[in-house]
Image (spheres, rainbow, N blue to C red):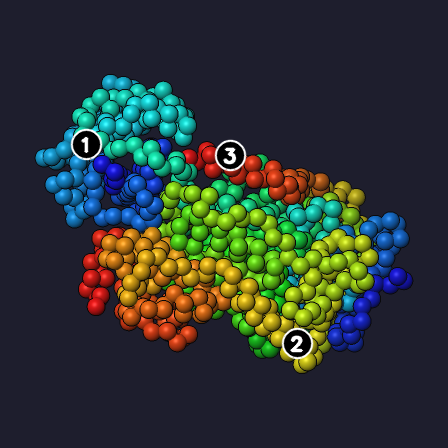
Amino acid sequence: MKDLKTYAPIEWCPGCGNFGILSIIEEILLEMKENGELIENFILLSGVGNHAKIVDYIHVNSFYTIHGRAVPVAEAIKLANPDTKVICFVGDGDGFAEGLSHLIFAAKRNADLTILVHDNRTYGLATGQFTPTSQSSYRASTMPEGAKEVSFNPLELMMASGASFIARGYPLKKEHFKSIVLEAINHKGFSVVDVLQVCVTFNNLYEDYNNSVNEESIKDIGNREKALKLIRAWNYSETKVPIPTGIFYQEERKRFEEFYSTLKEDGAERSVILDDILESLS
Amino acid sequence: MNTVTVQIGGKTGYGIHEAGVLVGRLFAKMGYNIYIMEDYPSIIKGGYEFIKIRAAKEKIGAHKDHIDLLLAMNQDAISRSKDNISKETKIIYNSDKVDNEEGLGLPLKSIIKEESTSGKELYIMIGALAKTLDLQWDLVDEVLKKHDGKDLENKLKAVKRGYESAEKGEPLKNQEDNKVLPVINGSHAISIGLLKAGLNALVGYPMTPTSPVLEFMAKYEKDLGIHVVLPESEIAVIMMALGYSYMGKRSAVATSGGGFSLMVEAIGLAAQAELPIVVVMGQRSGPSTGMPTYTAQTDLNFVQYASQGEFPRLIVAPGDAEEGVYWSGIALNKAWEYQIPAFVLTDKTHCLGYYSYDEKSIPKVKVEEGLLWDGKGTYKRYAKTEGGISPLAFPPLKDQVVKATGYVHDEAGITTENPDIAKGIADKRSKKKLKLIEDMKSYETVKTYGEGKTALLCWGSNKGVCMEASKLLGIKTIQVVMISPFPKEALAKALEGVEQLIDVECNSEGQLAILVKQYGFKVDETVLKYDGRSISVENLVEEVKKVIK
């Protein structure tokens, strides 16, 4: 197979930032396949929102879940079979609002997942409401006079939660973005990439990003202080300030699935154990 | 004596539960059938709790109010049981804490001091009980060694002292003709049933009354080679369980109403994505926090209708240990056969009540595979078939793709909003439902006990009390074991010759009665209890007498 496309018609607006993510993922998966990775070991997950349609467009195992809930499904998939490579596509409303607790706990557990947050800072499919990372100047249909609360910095939160790989990328800086995603997939542990994905219809930030995104390359990659400094350099509320992108933090740590043993399927052995248990209760 | 009800009462958090179960195991070793009921508040230490252990020659599944032997650790244990104490009741009490004119007073504090067996107060009481019922010392010694061997020497010392302090009363006879059966609670039974049917992963968030399912699974996780996962919320719980299902691993979740409320959205996902899942749903007093450690049968409607959209679901309501094992096994097997959500609808009475379990009395529970893909051609997760069931395959699968989704989808699992396909997959779910209804006709989904023109109608944990009361009254009991799909034909058959039907439930609206009426059956009377307490045999006999023709 030359590509990983499906017959599903792509339903994103022309110019949607999701195209950049789709093409990079396709490229990476194809390259990995050529390098001998088993494509059937990849499992893609998504929540609900414009980001989520991506799983329909890639001819790879997938589970299109419900809003905010892709991450716990992904954790279980990895526990069920540690040979899998699990990639979660989540949105900012999806992952940072509805399903935030799951991201925090997957980071805490160091579940070996790759989380790509399609952070367009609006509810696109729901037609333009305010999300946890919308800029303060954003005039959303639900907050026509501007924000009534400030945005949070999701990567700072991920750092506090114990994420072992933290990055931000901008798909228009194609090579840089690709290298970040590739590293995230190869990272053994919980990796999260906040992707500055632009919603061309409801929050078009292309111009701002093109002017303000900086490609950082950090040498001292496991240094929390330095990582936090970079992460905190941009607070998501402002738009016309420098925005660092790159891999901010990476560490090796025991992974969630390493705490679990392989599932046993031997029915006869189980019967004996259950009989013993019942004997112990009589 | 061939039967006895023992009650142990005292402060919560000081071993009343363990002592009660130990007494149950003593009687079980003598060949008795056991039923244990517990009443405790939502308090870790302090407050008042009691445990009731009933032993009988025949099979039982309910408690009696009247106490034959009371072990009273404090004044509450006597003053709060006044209605259940008669002049026949033998009372052994802690004379440090209790003023009582009758019975045997033991100064536990000074005995403990003399014997230096700190914390073993209840063992002194058990010793006194053993002597009062004229139990063999060897038996006491054996049971303690087997079930409560930690710090055994001090325990035995305390028991011995209690044994020596009491006098022999009317002996509790050995039931030599009976088998010695294991004593397990409803949660253990459900766990065993799921495990026999091949459970791979139990995902849970602790909540009364199903936490013992989590604890049981966690205790044997390594030996059994299963996964027990305890994530951040009930939402994560059910999503993880669906992750296992997607990978072909049999999963279940255990919860109660509050936790299940959080899981509801994902039940619809399971239905749309056609992923098997078992939910052990242990009812307790509601709405909201209600009374967390008290019982109810108030979620029959909730579980039947939870989640948006229309889809088939299996709901079974076991009423004792054997049914807990058997029907939980069926729930897991059918969930996989039909790729649907299945519910084991239980309650605090059943989950935390202990029963003698006779494995030989039920059909063998084993893994029944669902319809598996034959490996030919291109795999389509939602392939059209005659009966509506698409063959299962799980990733990783060489040269094949497995796509699951909560959206309306085509056969390959790709999203579509095409009206014909949308109608097609709704019809697919209906076909599965019809097939399930037919299939379940070969199971005993409605059970009857006894004969008579008057019948008690019950479900779940009220099985035991209805059976016993109806026997005493010379009437019939009809137990609806499967709630959904509703076993209309089986119920019609069970109702043949019945002229008066009395519905017995632990809720205030008569939810089963309403359901039964929807299917065109007549319910004449209802006996409803909704104070968080399970129904006693005496209480039910009295209530039924008021309405029986």
At 70% from the left edge and 51% from the top edge, which residue is drawn? A113
Q: CA distance from mark 2 to mark 1?
A: 71 Å
Residue kind at label 1, given as amino acid type: Glu
**Label 3 belongs to which residue?**
A276
Of B507 and A35, which appears nearest the observer? B507
**Label 2 belongs to which residue?**
B424
Q: Is residue B276 above or below residue B9?
A: below
Chain for numbered disc 3: A
**Label 1 belongs to which residue?**
B170
Q: Quadrant of the C terminus of chain B?
A: bottom left
Q: CA distance from mark 1 to mark 3?
A: 35 Å
Q: SS at mark 3?
A: helix
Q: Residues within 10 Å of mark 1 (few under 14, many from 20)?
A: few
Residue B259 visible in the current orientation = no
Please give left or right for residue B517 compared with residue A105 in the image: left
Q: SS at mark 1?
A: loop
Residue B418 visible in the current orientation = yes
Residue kind at label 3, given as amino acid type: Asp
Please give left or right for residue B203 compared with residue A155 in the image: left
Where does residue B483 sit, x and y in percent of width and height?
45, 64
